[in-house]
Amino acid sequence: MITRTSGSFLEKVELGDSSPHLSLVHNDPLERIMFDRNLAGVEFRRACLEASRLFIDHLMDEFDPEHAAELMILSKGLVYQLAEAVATQTGKNLPTNLIATSRVSVSSDQVKVEIPYAKFEAPSRTLLVGDTVASGATIVAALEAYRKLHPLDQVFVVSYAGTLVGARKIEEYCRKRAIKVKFLFGLAAFGLADNGFDLSFLHPETVCREEYRRRAAEQFAGIPVSAIGWDFGSQAMAPQKYRQLCWIESEMWKLQGEACFKTAEQPHELSLLRHEEAAYSDIADTLRESL
């Protein structure tokens, strides 16, 4: 991988012989995504595309779009805009396979994923996947579905925000099937909170630069608030839902009115937010009674 490009720097994470092939990427677009919980709408989309373009630049000594394809995990894979990033940086087309996944249950140690839809019409032995990596269960389920139809030799996973436990789960799956896998994560390899949703710079297992830990502590008053929220991508795909989830976060962490959640919007009811209820289960009943 290319260590330094225009405006971006990559550093490999060394965590022992059993660690996944994981590198952290540092640049301004990723910092905007990870340190501005009020970033939404078109500005969020633009920051995501900028970050994806820089991910592609770091991969260009190993990744050839003419001999690869995207595995887009719907719906959050849409915000990565990888085909556009590849086209802009290389002038080449990136064929796309589609898969829809749904987390039907989430706990601190297990995530169950269902696949209601898949369309694998661009077979390739090398795949590029852009997705938030929490438990790793979603990407594992997507790769398993793909492998039922097509052989697979290599996977590149790019993630604006990814956890170490998720990378290890994906790496273990790939290693047992002789699939090479490499990860590019934005800014940190996060620890994963017990609710299965929060990715915080302040989690004790997070691997990151000390300056990021300090910035997060200042921004969130020392509280381990998720750097990306509970439904990454909703910032642009469902902004009202994002603002409502932010309001619940501010309630849960007692940060109402703080600048980090200045766009938060109180929901009138919780049906729109049911898929994320595991993240706020401790206060769910209280919220239902108050709304």
Image (cartoon, helix red, strand yellow):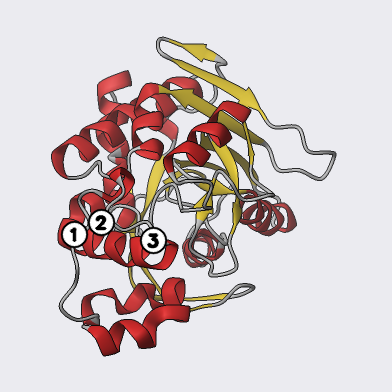
Q: Position of residue 270 (x, y in %)?
A: 24, 80
Q: Residues within 10 Å of mark 1 (few under 14, many from 20)?
A: some
Query: What's the residue at 40%, 49% (across, down)?
Result: 228
Q: Are marks 2 and 3 in contact (CB under 8 Å)?
A: no
Quadrant hosting residue 68: top left
In the figure, 110 relative to 185: above or below?
Answer: below
Type of the residue with mark 3 = Trp
In the figure, 256 relative to 41: above or below?
Answer: below
Q: Are marks 1 and 2 in contact (CB under 8 Å)?
A: yes
Q: Using residue 101 as the reference point, say whether residue 272 is left or right of it.
A: left
Type of the residue with mark 2 = Ser
Quadrant hosting residue 102: bottom left
Q: Quadrant of the N terminus?
A: top right
Q: Nearer the viewer, residue 93 or 33?
A: 33
Query: What's the residue at 62%, 43% (across, down)?
Result: 181
Quote the CA–CA distance across marks 2 and 3.
Answer: 9 Å
Residue 250 bears which disc, if any? none
Q: Quadrant of the C terminus?
A: bottom left
Q: Position of residue 41 (x, y in %)?
A: 16, 44
Q: Nearer the viewer, residue 96 or 79?
A: 79
Q: Position of residue 183 (x, y in %)?
A: 57, 39
The residue that disc 3 covers is 230
The residue that disc 1 covers is 238
Whether residue 97 is visible to the viewer of this picture, yes or no, is no
Quote the CA–CA distance across marks 3 and 1.
Answer: 12 Å
The residue that disc 2 covers is 234
Q: Using residue 207 as the reference point, say whether residue 215 is left or right of it.
A: left
Badge 3 element? loop
Q: Position of residue 207 (x, y in %)?
A: 66, 39
The residue at the far right in this view is 17
